[in-house]
Image (cartoon, coloured by chain):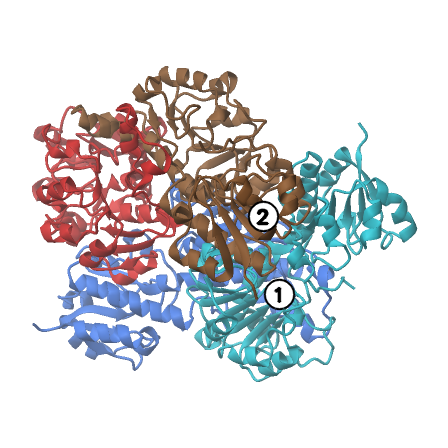
Chain colours: A red, B brown, C blue, D cyan
């Protein structure tokens, strides 16, 4: 029997980045792979390819006209990690075309990084290391002013998707009291994961450690504005690994410059962060260059998950590893394509 | 009935450092407290106090002549954190005098710090933060070369005392394969904690992350010398939070300068670390100023444990929170008093 | 604004069984509830009701003609616990109508029962209790022949859905080696849950404890037939809590009568089990009357989950608590309606 | 060098019961083994053996006169599982002779059994099985009246030694609220294990599941008398696996006969339980013949622990696996020797 065809149009990713040899061979044995890595596949080539493909891996623009041509299409897999407004989701979901997101593969990498940020801030790890390089380190107890144990610390998580749940697993041995704010989830769901559902206000006012993990949507721009950032307790830790758009950075920078709390920031409204940004000078801040998720293992896990789910779909079984698009939420996502 | 007396001679610690108000009041209600905080209690005063004390909290020198005078002594509690050669242990242990160490209160603080070091090294957290301050950070995947997940990483622990066991609890969600080298413990004991007992050679040759947690003894000086440090795999993480004497630092610095592996170091053969030490310049090293354990919460936990155990002993029950001296091992400990 | 309408046609369940007061009030405040509890809603009434309903809770027959009338239908929720062949699933799923199953609410109840069966068999709990009543009990070690610890036992799980995953959580502290056979899931998915994917043959040949948790499908009738049951090791435990159709009971009874292994059985090909069944006399068997899931708390959890998801759907958010139908698998389910 | 000698006088146990081949060979390679299994070693033989032994494994009577003769004695290891009043403990402990108890090897076996009892009672497992044999079983929900999930149930543990701590580990995934009553332990110790310290009264009045795990002492006979048993909530589960002497059985039987609560009983004031005991007829009781700990694996674990600790002591290291006698508590233990 003829193999079904998969179009790889993964820009700005690449097949080599996403797949280990073993998974790529597995896919090759099951499918005919059409790989386009010279930027995005140009429209003319795409038009020719669409009618015969079983699945598309990448962020290919797929308005309804194109989708209509893809008569055998069963799955579209986003490998950026954020659903974009590049597909007619409604058309797909009402015709049994899976729209999947491989971004779930980043969850554990981001969760480990977030925990690393929390301990690093709570214990002044980068700060102390820097003082050594300035030959000004202090020893023992003197260097531990304000340091505290994660164990038992009151913790708040804003946005309880895959990353939040991966983080909660890592936090289990620390026996924290964990509060969660996520307006898309029922209270009972949050409780079922061992956390307390709370309002944003309660979370910010009571947490010693705050993790901001929510994705960017059309609804949550600057959800952490002046009022909300004022709610944060003195000496708390503010850890941002998701999207800069959630936070009014002007206010945030001002708060940090006034040493109201500490922060670890992996994303910025403008990247690269402007050279003259005041953030670069603050001792109560850890800066990180949009790198919490994108490690080698996470990319290869994407490939593994893609191969697993494509194999399932080929066997007429539902995919189980990648994240499925939900029509209600996918149209609210507001991340822009990677530049 | 008259209250029994406790001598607090905690130099270089202090009663205020060790006890929260609540625990101090609890002790005051149960005992008469004799507190000496002006350095160590001078011999003449000590001689007068010894005959009436029920317990001594501190690193008071207690050779046999003094112990003989302490006719009502039931417990001696070290608050430095390391058993010293300041007591005739044999005399005490054969007369039902408990010799206890409050250092166990540091275990969780050190374990959290060790985990923080591991993530910080695996993900280049302090390095990247430093690059921001030099305005030379790189973004995204480019900045993640060599970074890896703790999840599933092969890990080795050298010295499996209270800190090692506290660390293993924190590592549980990471589903690592954990090897342990500890010549004082049976293999089955290590297996019972979910780890694999291995030789030092196997541990160093196979682990991606190496935690050195063993206390200093008369037997383990430079147990990590040239031969052993050569066994460490390229790109491994070497995390030292216990005692500098275990490691041949000259060799270690040379290895690190040649980028053979990465390291986080909380202790040094000479403290403060000499200003001109090459370590201060290495990008693959995180430096920390002997501060993994000594945070506020750990000191107050010491006091809580001391109060709990003194209360038990007063009720003629065995202590359960502090670590008891074992004659076989206590005489092998070689930590020097804090300067 | 007018409230949307929900039809409750839950036969053979009832609203009172499924909902605690609090959840029912919550639903009443959000929706207009149309409740029919006099058997199944008759066709004439149903025809009138369909055009205005937002959701249907129950096992109402919904062929395409009826679905076409239900112009505002957004969700159908099965409260039996098994998807039945009573709905045109394809029609629903291609029109954004959620088809959900509240059976997931039984998972923890079944998982606890399965663990209870395992310990009861491994330790002869019901057998010994029975001997007391016959005044023939033996004491101490003599009574423990063949008894063993769950800790470290090799365990196999057949069918790794919600129940299997709930069970794996309960088994975590026992440090078992757990194998899983589930042809609908990728190996990596099973590994991700800390288990080993294996063939059915390997599972049966190597496991000391075997849990049969797979739902009945058109493909798995008698998947445990003569050949497979012969693979089971002597003295193993065979625990069946899902569906009798998976097992060739004639062979199974013969094996048990010959004391090849032990079993706990919650389901039977014919229920009630015939009075004259040989199973009723066997000492190596624990018999249970199709009751692993249906406890009060599980039914009320169903109601909670239904209320949570209906509230989400009303807010134009995707449901997160109930199990969604997948077109590929839902049409293969072969459970018959509850009699 | 000559091997040191170990006397095995394990009556009523035997060497074969306690040691697997591997551990016995290990001991043989390290020590000269003097084995006496014909009842207890007679006094004349014992007198000759004592002067040369390094360790004694068994419940040999060791008053001070005999101990004085055992000039090389370093360790005495009880293999019954309870410390008896057969040794001059004070003499031993003040001369650096370890007195150890292998009973800790039973902990996990008892903990698993206790959990098995809890699920069996909560879900009526033995009762339903019995009804099948009487051809009177009821199906489905009707059979589940009063059944409940362990998940989230309020649980109380009386006596928090090795068994209690082993049980708490097994209960972790059930997310219970666990209260502990143990007058020998500080509140903070109990909290450190994730449980709430409470009074006996609070525990009995608030717990849905009550585990009685405390050993028999001179102080706790009938600690659960009429007043205390009256405190137990209706429909609670009462699980007794430690010692019958803790409970006023006359009152207990009366309460159970009146269906005040349910119970699983592994020990009785008189064993065998009198044939005419009313307990044998009660449907709300599970009876077990003093068999929670004594399974094959537990005995062999005893041997493993004994071999491990003797090897450590031979190497001049402290034992770590067996339980050490504490002078304060060992003299309060009141278990009688096994008949």
Q: Position of residue C335 (x, y in %)?
A: 39, 63
Disc 2 is attached to a residue of which chain?
B
Secondary structure, mark 2, is: helix
Instruction: Return the x and y of residue B151 as percentages of the image width and height.
Output: 38, 37
- Compared across the picture, whether B216 is left or right of A47 comes to right
Q: Residue at x 11, y 27 (%)?
A: A275
Residue D289: x %, y % from top left: 69, 67
Is residue C70 among what the camera can see? yes
At mark 1, the secondary structure is loop
- Local crowd size for mark 1, using a 10 Å CA cut-off: few (<14), some (14–19), many (≥20): many
Where is residue B215 drawn, in percent x and y? 51, 33
- Tags 2 and 1 on a common chain: no
Depth-wise, is mark 2 or mark 1 nearer the camera? 2
D199 over B225 or under it: above or below? below
Residue B262 left/right relative to D294: left
Answer above or below: position of B244 versus A184.
above
Is there a contact, CB below 8 Å, between mark 2 and mark 1? no
What residue did someone put label 1 on?
Answer: D241
Depth check, front residue: C326 or B163: B163
Q: Residue at x 49, y 54 (%)?
A: B33
The N terminus of chain D sits in image quarter: top right
Viewer-nearest residue: C210 or C338: C210
**Chain containing mark 1:** D
The residue at which mark 2 appears reads as: B50
């Amino acid at each position: 029997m003829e193999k079904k065809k998969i179009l790889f149009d993964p820009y700005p990713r690449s097949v080599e980045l996403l797949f280990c040899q073993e998974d790529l061979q597995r896919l090759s044995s099951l499918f005919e792979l059409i790989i386009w890595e010279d930027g995005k596949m140009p429209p003319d080539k795409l038009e020719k390819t669409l009618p015969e493909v079983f699945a598309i891996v990448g962020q290919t623009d797929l308005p309804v006209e194109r989708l209509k041509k893809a008569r055998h299409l069963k799955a579209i897999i986003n490998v950026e990690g954020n659903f974009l407004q590049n597909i007619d989701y409604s058309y797909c979901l009402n015709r049994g075309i899976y729209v999947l997101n491989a971004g779930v593969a980043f969850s554990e990498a981001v969760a480990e990084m977030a925990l690393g940020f929390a301990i690093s801030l709570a214990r002044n790890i980068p700060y102390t290391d820097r003082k050594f390089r300035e030959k000004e380190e202090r020893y023992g107890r003197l260097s531990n002013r304000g340091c505290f144990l994660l164990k038992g610390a009151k913790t708040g998580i804003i946005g309880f998707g895959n990353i939040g749940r991966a983080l909660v697993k890592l936090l289990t041995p620390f026996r924290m009291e964990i509060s969660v704010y996520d307006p898309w989830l029922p209270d009972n769901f949050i409780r079922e994961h061992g956390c307390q559902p709370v309002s944003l206000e309660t979370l910010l006012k009571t947490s010693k450690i705050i993790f901001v993990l929510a994705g960017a949507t059309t609804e949550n721009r600057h959800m952490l504005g002046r009022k909300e950032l004022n709610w944060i307790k003195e000496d708390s830790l503010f850890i941002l690994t998701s999207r800069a758009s959630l936070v009014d950075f002007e206010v945030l920078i001002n708060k940090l410059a006034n040493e109201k709390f500490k922060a670890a920031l992996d994303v910025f409204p403008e990247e690269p962060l402007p050279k003259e940004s005041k953030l670069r000078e603050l001792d109560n801040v850890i800066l990180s260059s949009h790198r919490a998720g994108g490690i080698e293992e996470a990319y290869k896990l994407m490939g593994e998950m893609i191969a697993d789910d494509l194999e399932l779909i080929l066997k007429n079984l539902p995919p189980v590893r990648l994240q499925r698009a939900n029509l209600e939420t996918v149209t609210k996502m507001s991340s822009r394509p990677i530049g």
